[in-house]
Each structure stands twice: as structure tokens, then as C-alpha cells.
Amino acid sequence: MTIRFRISAFAAAAAAGGLLLTACSATDTAPAQTNAGAGAEAHPGTGHLHGLGVDPAGGTLYAAGHLGVFRLTPDGAVRIADRSQDTMGFTVTGPRTFLASGHPSPADPAATSPHLGLIRSTDAGQSWTTVSAAGEADFHSLQQAGPLLYGLDSQTSPVWASNDAGATWERRAKTAAGDLAAHSGTPQEVWAAGRDGLLHSTDSGVTFQPVPGAPALAAVEQPTPGRLIALTLDGSVLTGGDGTSWTWTERGRLPGGAQGSVLTAAGPTHLLAADTNDAVHESRDGGRTWTTVHQAGHTDTEH
């Protein structure tokens, strides 16, 4: 989902009483709910979700949204380290290792810019360090593909590429898409999906060509080389061709007719998806069937 966020003065945003967390979309935040008794303060929830991932060190599921990074448990979503940064881009790249982007919390006294650039955590979200592009980039999609890291900057719409884990970047083609997909087996290939369909690059994002017949897409993933899985705006899960044949086949649908928002491939057949109501769904069979693993507003106390 492509969301534009422009702001001229971080201090003004902070003074606006939380504008930074809500400016990305007027409808992003789910209704606040609480598991506590009557009269308790309502928990604000996760905020609209923009990223999902599985930590290979234990298989824990994480979700990133406007109000922080959350560990999803059977009892609800637990915000990590009481950090409420607006996490617009998020990916798990290794055991306890996350990359993210977005905006700092207005309550963060150390924040000097509305854009985090690229940040990294090596302790499963307990702490973060700035890698690059602070104050400059707001990556809404981050994709690690072997030696290459791709980022889609919402500020200027170009695809950025890095071959040194994000320390330095090259700006590649501009695209109006909202999501990127790439795979370590074919790192020079990158796909860009959005409401206008699907684009394909074979030169690491320098140029893109439209993929004929692709529908409007909420998200796309490449779980294995030569195979795409896409999530449409209406919640259909599609499989795409091998680069030469682009017949799209509906493989499944998100539960309850939900509209799609986020898609992540945690493995060749292990998929995660979020819908526009900020519920999280999981498939273990490549998208044929789905189980809802988190409902919006089901948020536990912070840890």
C-alpha cells in the first residue's frame, strides 16, 4: 500500500499532539481495545500494520505498525521495549536481526528528524541503531536479496539499492509501486507491485518493465526463484508465472473476505499476511488455506 508522508518541521509535528503517528493515513489506526476490566485505559493497539516477519531464532512472529514493533503471542501483541516508533518498512534478515524504517515517536527526546532512514536491531527489536539515510529516506518496503538490499523510498519514489548492508546506497529507477519483492537466488531481479499492476527489473532496479495482465496488487513476494505470490486489494492470493508465462491463478483468499494489505514469505510455502483491518493471517500451504493468528486490537501489556 503506497502512503505518502511529507512534513516540513519535526518540531511542529511533535507539538501537534501526535500528528506524526497519524499523518500517514487518517484511517490507519484500529479502534482501541483492552483486555483489562471496565474503566481501565484503552490500549491503542498496534496501529496500522506495515510489516510481518518470523525470527528464525525460535520462530517468533513479529508485526510492525504505526505504534511500534510487536511480538505476536496467543495472548495478543506485545510491544517490544516500549518503543512506539512509526515502523513503515520492516523485514527480518537473520536470527534476532531486523531492518526497519519510518518515523520516530513524537515523544522521543532524541529525535531530530521525521524520517528514521534505515535502522537495524540485532536483539529482536529491543534496541535499534541508525545505519544510513537518517532524515532523508522513509522506506516503505525493504527486501534483502543475497548481497543486495533494496528499499523503496516513499519520499521520492525511487528504488534504492545497496551492496553493503545499507551502509551506502545507489538510487535506481522511480516507480509508483508500494511493495518490492526479490530473492537471494536471483538478486539482480526485483519486482515492484502496486495499484497499477506489477513491474519487473532484471538489472537490480535500474530499469523496470510492466508485466502484462497483472492486476492491481497490495503486495508481492518471491518465495523461490521463478515463482511469485501476490496479494490483491480484495484479499485474493495469486500465483504468477516463471517470467515467460504470466497467467495468474487464484490460489486462495484471506479469511472473511478481508482486503489485503501486507504479504511476507517466511519460507517457500510459509506465508504471512495482514489485512486492512490489521488482523494477521498465516498459511503453511503456499496460500491455499489461512488461519487468523492475531485480531486487531488484541494487544497485551508492553514488555
Image (tube, rainbow, N blue to C red):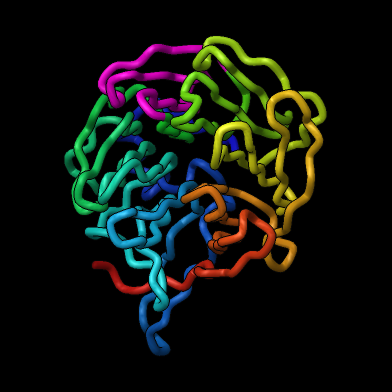
Name the residue: 46% across, 24% down: 187
Tell me if residue 71 is in the magenta stretch: no
| Image position, residue 156 (x, y; %) | 50, 19
The stretch in magenta equals: 146-174
| Image position, residue 131 (x, y; %) | 24, 29
Quadrant of the image containing the C terminus: bottom left
Name the residue: 64% across, 32% down: 193
Quadrant of the image containing the N terminus: top right
- Residue toward you, 52 or 246: 246
So how many labels did they put on this image? 0
Q: In the shown orientation, is residue 155 left or right of residue 86?
A: right
Residue 20 showing in the rendered view: no
Give the quadrant of residue 175. top right
- For residue 243, above or below residue 120: above
The extreme bottom residue here reads 37
Q: In the shown orientation, is residue 248 left or right of residue 288?
A: right
Give the quadrant of residue 166. top left
Q: In the shown orientation, is residue 126 left or right of residue 224?
A: left
Name the residue: 34% across, 33% down: 114
- For residue 66, above or below residue 158: below
- For residue 264, above or below residue 112: below
| Image position, residue 134 (x, y; %) | 28, 26
- Residue toward you, 276 or 243: 243
| Image position, residue 55 (x, y; %) | 34, 54
Name the residue: 61% across, 41% down: 219
Residue 131 showing in the rendered view: yes
- Residue toward you, 259 or 163: 163
Tell me if residue 168 is in the magenta stretch: yes
